[in-house]
Image (cartoon, coloured by chain):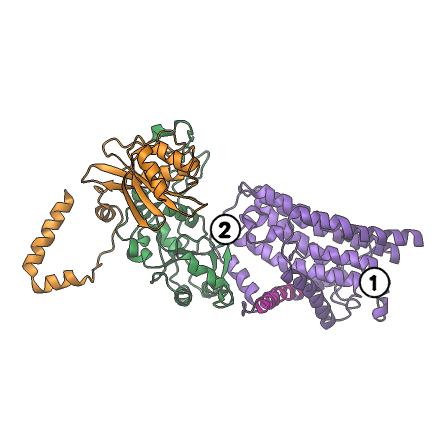
Chain colours: A purple, B orange, C green
């Protein structure tokens, strides 16, 4: 029992650290995008100000129980994803609740948030929200396909479903990273990464011009606050997951910050120079090359053992 | 251009021909000849583009005047056809079968002047005014300033910097007051 | 334009005072708290104004350069949002015709409680160039409460940024209470609105 309470305390501490990291990451990305456009951009702490403003709105209109539960599910998905993943390898207080088999649980949590959001948005009373929900769900589903295949290939390679053991197998120099020992799975995983980070070219359902038909249309005041906080958690959790799976994990916090920032910059730089795909185009793109790469990765390890 | 004008004069009895610029001619025809004239210009002379259809209010003559501006893509000339219709019961033949775009013009004229175009689809739909219960506002007997002062709350303290009015009040106050009083009374009629 | 003319497209108008179908509640005042947390919220509201991307008139052409690199209002934390639910600043840019006023009222009433209005251009102040027109209103603050007016025809983007500064100062002092004013004088505003919008086909309060 003592172990459980200590782990819980450490989990809250790491949640606090990662929440601030996610908010500042969002602010820095706004700054970088603005500098690429040649202007100054908002200050780095702008996501905090947005969150406080949205929590300070005095009235809120609710459309029913499911409407309120939508952001709650999404937030639960984000925090759940984070809590069951080891953050820093070998550290005492950043282990969270990781256990063996958490690789599958993590994939479940990534999808769970979007499903809850869809249910909530359907009750929002907006006549076009089913269209936006259909687009968002299709986007998330199709970008999970190469990711699941890459994960299966990794599990077959290392013979385990625990993220901690996968990270342990990658220690000892850059030659041991999964990027080098299993490049096909890494390629499939990184292509799925672009879809999951929701930057261009895959941000149709979040684009400002498309928002009036999307899930977040009717959400305001506290509901929007939950979604904004979730964005911080979810983004950092996904980055840490990818870092653990393909790029060797981190043994201390500065290395964690460096690696996840570089990974996020990859998505942002691809996003800044590309226009948006429509939904049919992005589904076709994902089903062709990334899925083929994932299937090849799985087949290599099927016939190797 | 001159041959075209001769043909129009002989076929449709076009009057009052005025050359506004080179390659731009205004002609006037009777109301009964207008549809035929416009159809002839469109089909046989190549004036296939209706630039504008508009109306004027001649309240002293008790008539409305309709102007149809037509343009020729091939030799880049313009002909504008005018007619006069009665102001008491204003109706006109609709030309929406020749150009679909004429539907919008006729709807607008119906709303702003009150000229009816039977045969034009959706001619009674409101165009720019919603819930309008007065006389059509572009007629000359509609006092728009009075309507605006009564309906929309004007902000007090608005003054004019018109030089003539200011100097009149300064130099000849009594005459200016009498003149303004007469103007107000006449406008209220 | 009478009812009898619409025989072919008869629109069935619902009864907006039916409590089964529509919520007939009127807006409520939510007063400010008088402590340090309210000051913190005021500071956050002033530094993160999200404006409704609805260009109501000719002045919206002066709003577009603000998002570009030269004038850049994103450094003040101002971002455009497409829905009135998520925005707290509404810029009424230019003249307001009767048709537009109906849509402005519908959008304004859907915004949540701390909400601010900037009247851009002289037409919102006293009617401007269209003071004697049969279709444009003369005084905007008889229909919705206004916080800041920016005079000009049209004011340049620098003038609009000065208007934002003035609005932020007003919010931080605690005077940005347009929504509460609207709730308090709701009957007067509604009577003014119904006087000029003669075909009223929406509920009394579009929450």
Tell me where residue B103 sits by quadrant. Answer: top left
The correct choice, above or below, for A186 with respect to B76 in the image is: below
Label 2 sits on a secondary structure element that is loop
Foreground residue among A233 and A201 = A201
The residue that disc 2 covers is C83
Crowd rating for badge 2 (residues with CA inside 10 Å; few <14, some 14–19, many 20+)? many
Foreground residue among C201 and C64 = C64
Foreground residue among C68 and A137 = C68
Percent from the top left, x then y, of residue A156?
87, 54
| Magenta-tinted stretch | A18-37
The correct choice, above or below, for A149 with respect to A175 in the image is: above
Q: Are marks 1 and 2 on the same chain?
A: no
Foreground residue among B132 and B81 = B81
Q: Quadrant of the C terminus of chain A?
A: bottom right
Percent from the top left, x then y, of residue A107?
75, 52
Q: Quadrant of the N terminus of chain A?
A: bottom right
Q: Is residue B110 visible?
A: no
Q: Chain of mark 1?
A: A
The correct choice, above or below, for C155 with respect to A155 in the image is: below
The residue that disc 1 covers is A178
The correct choice, above or below, for B113 with respect to A79 in the image is: above
Which residue is at a point 64% across and 62% down the rendered structure image?
A273
Which residue is at a point 27% across and 53% down the rendered structure image?
C131
């Amino acid at each position: 029992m003592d172990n459980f309470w200590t782990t819980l305390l450490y989990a809250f501490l790491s949640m606090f650290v990662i929440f601030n990291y996610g908010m500042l990451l969002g602010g820095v990305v706004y700054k970088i995008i603005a500098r690429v456009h040649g202007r100054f951009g908002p200050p780095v702490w702008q996501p905090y100000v947005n969150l406080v403003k949205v929590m300070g709105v005095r009235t809120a209109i609710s459309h029913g129980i499911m409407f309120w539960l939508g952001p709650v599910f999404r937030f639960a998905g984000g925090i759940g994803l984070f809590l069951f993943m080891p953050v820093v390898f070998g550290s005492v207080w950043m282990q969270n609740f990781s256990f063996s088999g958490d690789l599958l649980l993590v994939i479940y949590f990534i999808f769970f948030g979007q499903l809850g959001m869809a249910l909530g948005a359907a009750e929002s009373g907006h006549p076009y929200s089913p269209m936006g929900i259909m687009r968002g769900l299709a986007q998330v589903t199709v970008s999970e396909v190469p990711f699941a295949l890459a994960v299966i290939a990794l599990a077959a390679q290392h013979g385990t479903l625990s993220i901690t053991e996968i990270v342990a197998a990658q220690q000892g120099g850059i030659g041991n990273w999964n990027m080098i020992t299993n490049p096909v799975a890494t390629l499939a995983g990184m292509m799925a990464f672009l879809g999951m980070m929701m930057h261009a070219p895959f941000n149709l359902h979040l684009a400002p011009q498309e928002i009036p038909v999307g899930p977040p249309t009717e959400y305001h005041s506290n509901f929007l606050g939950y979604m904004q906080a979730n964005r911080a958690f979810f983004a950092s959790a996904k980055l840490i997951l990818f870092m653990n799976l393909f790029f060797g994990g981190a043994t201390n916090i500065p290395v964690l910050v460096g690696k996840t920032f570089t990974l996020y910059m990859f998505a942002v730089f691809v996003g800044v120079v590309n226009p948006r795909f429509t939904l049919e185009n992005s589904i076709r793109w994902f089903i062709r090359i990334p899925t083929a790469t994932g299937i090849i990765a799985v087949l290599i390890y099927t016939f190797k053992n | 251009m001159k041959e075209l004008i001769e043909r129009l004069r002989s076929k449709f009895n076009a009057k009052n021909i005025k050359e506004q610029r080179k390659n731009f001619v205004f002609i006037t025809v009777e109301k009964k000849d207008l549809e035929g004239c416009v159809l002839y210009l469109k089909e046989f002379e190549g004036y296939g583009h209706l630039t504008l259809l508009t109306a004027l209010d001649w309240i002293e003559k008790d008539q409305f005047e309709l102007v149809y501006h037509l343009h020729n893509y091939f030799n880049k000339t313009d002909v504008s056809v005018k007619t006069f219709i009665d102001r008491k019961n204003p109706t006109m033949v609709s030309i929406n079968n020749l150009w679909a775009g004429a539907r919008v013009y006729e709807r607008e004229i119906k709303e702003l002047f009150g000229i009816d175009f039977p045969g034009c689809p959706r001619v009674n739909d409101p165009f720019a005014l919603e819930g309008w219960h007065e006389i059509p506002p572009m007629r000359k007997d509609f006092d728009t300033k009075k309507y605006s002062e009564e309906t929309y709350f004007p902000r007090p303290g608005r003054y004019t910097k018109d030089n003539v009015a200011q100097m009149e009040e300064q130099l000849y106050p009594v005459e200016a007051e009498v003149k303004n009083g007469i103007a107000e009374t006449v406008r209220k009629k | 334009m009478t009812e009898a003319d619409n025989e072919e497209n008869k629109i069935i108008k619902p009864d907006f005072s039916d409590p089964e179908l529509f919520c007939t509640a009127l807006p409520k005042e939510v007063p400010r708290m008088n402590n340090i947390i309210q000051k913190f919220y005021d500071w956050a509201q002033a530094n993160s104004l999200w404006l409704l991307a609805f260009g109501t008139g000719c002045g919206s052409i002066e709003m577009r350069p603000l998002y570009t690199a030269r004038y850049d209002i994103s450094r003040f934390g101002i971002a455009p949002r497409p829905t009135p639910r998520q925005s707290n600043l509404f810029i009424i840019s230019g003249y307001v015709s009767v048709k537009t006023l109906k849509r402005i009222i519908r959008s304004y009433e859907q915004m949540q409680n701390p909400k601010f209005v900037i009247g851009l251009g002289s037409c919102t102040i006293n009617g401007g160039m269209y003071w004697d027109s049969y279709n444009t209103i003369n005084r905007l603050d008889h229909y919705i409460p206004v916080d800041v007016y920016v005079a000009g025809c049209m004011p340049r983007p620098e003038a609009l940024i000065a208007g934002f500064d003035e609005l932020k100062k007003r919010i931080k002092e605690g005077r940005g209470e347009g929504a509460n004013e609207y709730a308090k004088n709701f009957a007067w505003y509604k009577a003014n609105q119904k006087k000029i919008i003669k075909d009223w086909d929406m509920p009394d309060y579009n929450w």
